[in-house]
């Protein structure tokens, strides 16, 4: 039945491509969460009237974030080819896509982190300060726990973008479902392969969205 509906599809290729997409997405989500969290904390803490208020540093970090957010992902991959080859040793395959995926998505998530931190009740922060709490205590005991539902929602949105980015990266040899849809589907005019790859990407998106929403709702104490 499967081969009648999708005569050009190879199950082994589909499984391999799906595994590569999940691999790229999972690792890039972890990297994006860490780097984006650091960027978001820097943006928030160095802004006016905050703990590390520093206008020049805030301007530098904000500029870096805005520049990388403005570069289209497909161009960013090309720009990062020399860096990727130096770091990974190749510009092809799932591992080679990771630097561009993380660097492309972290600034976006960094802004979402900054917005989430701004929503934290200032009174709670001031209360912690008045009790002599250190900066690290305020960050790890107040800011991050209070903003965690929004942080999870933000990384969920970002992970959906990363799935799309991984598909784009596949077009230039990173592997995954994007690579399958383009090289083994579109270029051979086998649109059943393109259709199947699209369905699998949509399923992965739904899974990430469901898991992210579930965790966010569990963490939300309101």
Image: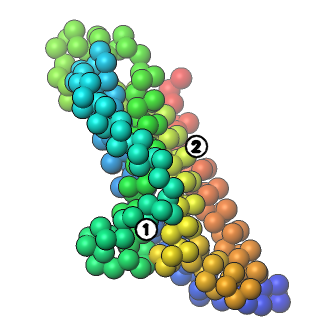
Q: Which mark is residue 78?
A: 1
Quote the CA–CA distance across marks 2 and 1.
33 Å
- Check the image and report above or below for 194 versus 110: below
Q: Where 193 sits versus 44, above or below?
A: below
* Left or right: where 74 falls relative to 91: right
Query: Disc 2 or disc 1, which is closer to the eye?
Result: 1
Labels 2 and 1: the sequence-earlier one: 1
Quadrant holding the N terminus:
bottom right
Name the secondary structure under disc 1.
Answer: helix
In this orientation, does residue 131 appear? yes
Visible in this render: residue 140?
no
Label 1 Cα crowd, 10 Å radius (few <14 / some 14-19 / many 20+): some
Q: Position of residue 92 (x, y in %)?
A: 41, 79
Return the residue nearer the eye: 32 or 19: 32
Residue 152, disc: none
Asked which colour scheme the image uses, the reply is rainbow
Q: Is residue 125 above or below residue 190?
A: above
């Amino acid at each position: 039945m499967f081969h009648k509906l999708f005569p050009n599809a190879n199950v082994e290729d589909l499984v391999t491509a799906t595994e590569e997409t999940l691999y790229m997405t999972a690792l890039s989500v972890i990297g994006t969460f860490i780097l984006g969290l650091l960027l978001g904390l820097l943006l928030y803490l160095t802004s006016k009237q905050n703990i590390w208020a520093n206008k020049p540093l805030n301007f530098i970090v904000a500029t870096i974030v805005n520049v990388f957010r403005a570069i289209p992902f497909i161009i960013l991959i090309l720009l990062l080819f020399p860096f990727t080859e130096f770091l990974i040793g190749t510009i092809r395959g799932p591992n080679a896509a990771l630097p561009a995926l993380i660097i492309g998505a972290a600034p976006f998530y960094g802004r979402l982190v900054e917005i989430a931190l701004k929503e934290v009740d200032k009174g709670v922060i001031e209360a912690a300060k008045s009790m002599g709490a250190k900066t690290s205590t305020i960050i790890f005991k107040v800011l991050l726990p209070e903003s965690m539902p929004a942080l999870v929602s933000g990384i969920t949105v970002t992970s959906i973008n990363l799935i799309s980015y991984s598909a784009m990266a596949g077009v230039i040899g990173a592997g995954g479902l994007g690579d399958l849809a383009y090289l083994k589907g579109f270029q051979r005019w086998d649109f059943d392969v393109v259709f199947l790859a699209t369905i699998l990407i949509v399923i992965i998106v739904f899974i990430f969205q469901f898991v992210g929403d579930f965790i966010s709702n569990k963490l939300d104490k309101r």
